[in-house]
Amino acid sequence: MRFLKLIFDFYLNASIHVALAVVALLVVSCQTLNIPINYSLLGVALGGTIVCYNFIKYGVEAEKYLMVSNLYHRIIQIFSFLCFGFAVYFLLKLEAKLWWGILILGLISSLYAVPLLPQTRNLRSLGGLKIFIVALVWSGFTIVLPVLDSDRVFDWDVYVLIFQRFILVLALLLPFEIRDLQWDNPELRTLPQVYGEQRTRQLGMILSVIFCLIPFLKDELGLVEILAGLFIALTLMMMFVYKGNMKKRYFASFWVESLPILWAILLWGLGKLL
């Protein structure tokens, strides 16, 4: 059991789980918009997310963002280098038009950890603003890129989905903000620090409702999309209702980040049944 726990902890600490969540959201976009899945883009999303998240989590504390002294972190760093090569391999298989989008989103992700200029702060230190930056990057990578890849027109339905994705990611980030309340520097002024844990939970429930209602603005909406979205919204609301859960070790890092994966599975399963 101890060995399995070590494997599971590495799976979470090395950002594999969050990377699968990003891949799942990309698949959801393709399912919802009825566009083909580009597996090379999935490969870039998987490897790139692992590299970015591990750099943000461990690179900031490392000397010159690379020299880590902790053995466990060094193992994660080596794994991240392998994932970088994995991402580059699939990046070279993509059309050049996607490279610009990936470059811009990658730059924003880098600025989340590294200041643009010396003596300036990184985007991560901007407190309440940081979750909006993360939501913007996730929305761009999981909707804008697959739409660009498929040559689909950016019509009304696409913009509605971008807005819905932005709202969902905001809601998914709030449990992490609540969990980190006990460790975050008060100067960060995160949402729980400014408005309190209870109001942040209420905001999460409001965002869950908005997420569920947004698809009704679309020109084309199917029953499968409605049912899957409703289930995810209700599950997310329940997470905000039950107090204490968010400060448990695996609640945010595993269960909350599992929701995008569950959403993709639901869309696939309901699509087979209905």
Image: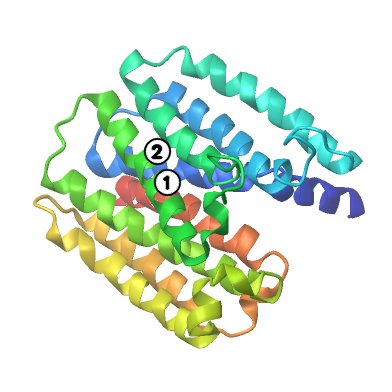
Q: Secondary structure at mark 2?
A: helix
- Cβ atoms at labels 1 and 2 below 8 Å apart: yes
Q: Is residue 27 visible?
A: no
Q: Name the residue tied to disc 2.
A: 141
Question: Label 2: few (<14), some or many (≥20) within 10 Å?
Answer: many
The amino acid type of the residue labelled 2 equals Phe
Q: Name the residue tied to disc 1.
A: 138
163 on left or right of 124: left
The quadrant in which residue 69 appears is top right
Camera-side residue of 102 and 260: 102
Q: Residue visible at 55% across and 32% down?
A: 48
Residue, far left: 219
96 on left or right of 83: left
Alpha-carbon distance for marks 1 and 2?
A: 5 Å
Q: Is residue 108 above or below residue 249?
A: above
95 on left or right of 47: left
Residue, far front: 119
Q: Is residue 85 above or below residue 240?
A: above
Q: Position of residue 132 (x, y in %)?
A: 41, 57
Q: Residue visible at 50% across and 18% down?
A: 90
Q: Position of residue 9 (x, y in %)?
A: 78, 51
Q: Is residue 187 visible?
A: yes
The colour scheme used here is: rainbow
Which numbered disc covers residue 224? none
The amino acid type of the residue labelled 1 equals Trp
Q: Is residue 142 above or below residue 211?
A: above
